[in-house]
Image (cartoon, coloured by chain):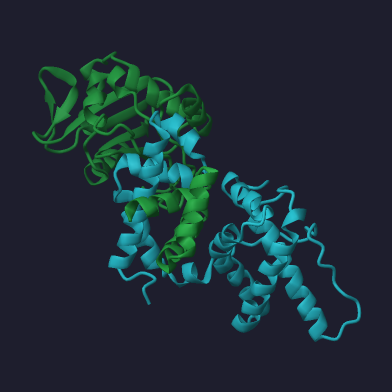
Amino acid sequence: MGISKEDEVFVSEIKSGNKMAFEAIVLKYQPKLMSALIGYTKSRDQAEELSQKTFLRVWQKIESFRGDSGLFTWIYRIGINLAKNDFASSHARSSKITDSLDQTDHDIPQHLSPEVELIALESEHRIMDFIQTLDADTKTAFTLREIDGRTYDEIAQILECPIGTVRSRIFRARQLILEFMNQENILNG
Amino acid sequence: MDNDIEKLSALYDGELSSKEMQESLEMMNEDDGLKETFKKFGLISDLLQRHSEQKTPKVLFLRDRLNKINPLLSNLVTAAATVMITLIVLYQLDDDRFQVDIDSSLQLSSAISSEQAKNQLLNADQNIMEHMIHIMQSSQSHKSQQVSKNWIPVGYSVNPDNPNQYSNGRNNLFFHLEKKQLGIKKVRYFKANNNWIYLIPLQDGRLLTAYGDVPPSVADPMIQSIYQRK
């Protein structure tokens, strides 16, 4: 599966040197990458260090990203290959393991960000139940976006409403979910 | 502030123009609170994806056109522009007891508003959806004597003015009979807002469709009595 439309926009900006767009991608994917790296290294400190190296590499090599895979898939491969190299170095192996970005010898497991993993199943169910209480228009637009990965334009066509309405419905859903999570002290420590 | 976060939400989805994107990125760059919000949008996405993978739902979207359909059903399910339908395989006919099979539940939340969306929907569960659309669009009534007394929930009686309608004074239930079962082997029910549609394959090869604002707690004894085994 290739790059998603939303990531394509960010990648294009990053390729033109937009550091803020890069930071947005870090915000979006670092928690997920951390989770993968913690799973691989069993060490949060090591994962933190590898995560920083990974995003540095992403910044340096973004020009070589062709969009044949999803952006996170590409980031994940860089992170895991760096972890493999670290592992090899620490075992004093002379043969260096490739950090080829095209390597596809493993599937990406469903890594969730550590924060999401902190959300207990019971809290998850409360959030999902809350989503069910959203009004039908809001819920439909939000679900089309988050589950189906539809663009705003596609959602507008399906729901026969202006794109601006789609945008505000999706925002409204996110806002209400965040308010609910705050109110329920989910992720507030 | 809401406007800023709305832009942030669209930024997250990659749906801003180049100019708006830059404005939004600059705004986020100067505000840690917005950064945190942006990060939480990602958490919500992850959570939904996790939940979606766990439940393996098949989510489609059905926009109702019920102003053009059977007015009986229209009265029941046209309250919202979009009807969210949940299809759940409820009863296991292979068992001696009819157990709720939550694990095999399948969610269909759909909105039919276009041929494209309708086609998508039909591909998902063609027979059932064809049937649903058929009964929604059908104004053909059946003879009331075809409805067995065993099917009527306790406390419900036929409306003298409408042999298809049964009521307990507050809730209404309608029946529809088909000669074919459309490959449906188990009782299934749909939820559409506050209303329910039950597809009940009968042992004689017909398919009974019961619909109305009658929840499963009321419909359950009715379904069990239909399937009462000797």
Q: Is residue B171 above or below residue B99?
A: above
Picture coordinates of residue A105, whole percent (x, y) = 79, 60
Q: Nearer the viewer, residue A186 or B124?
A: A186
Chain whose colour in the figure is green? B
Q: Nearer the viewer, residue B184 or B145?
A: B184
Picture coordinates of residue B18, whole percent (x, y) = 55, 45
Per the rendering, the colour in which chain A appears is cyan
Q: Along the horizontal axis of the image, is A79 left or right of A9?
A: right
- At a point 41% along the width and 42% down the height, the residue shown is A167
Q: Is residue B193 above or below residue B22?
A: above
Picture coordinates of residue B204, whole percent (x, y) = 39, 26
- At a point 13% along the width and 33% down the height, the residue shown is B156
Q: Nearer the viewer, residue B177 or B205?
A: B177
Q: Along the horizontal axis of the image, is A189 left or right of B119?
A: left
- Counting every numbered tag in the picture gives 0
Q: Residue furthest top?
A: B140
Picture coordinates of residue B136, whole percent (x, y) = 33, 22
Q: Nearer the viewer, residue B117 or A156?
A: A156
Q: Residue furthest right?
A: A94
Q: Is residue A135 visible?
A: yes
Q: Quadrant of the C terminus of chain A?
A: bottom left
Q: Is residue B178 visible?
A: no
- At a point 33% along the width and 56% down the height, the residue shown is B1
Q: Is residue B126 above or below residue B92?
A: above
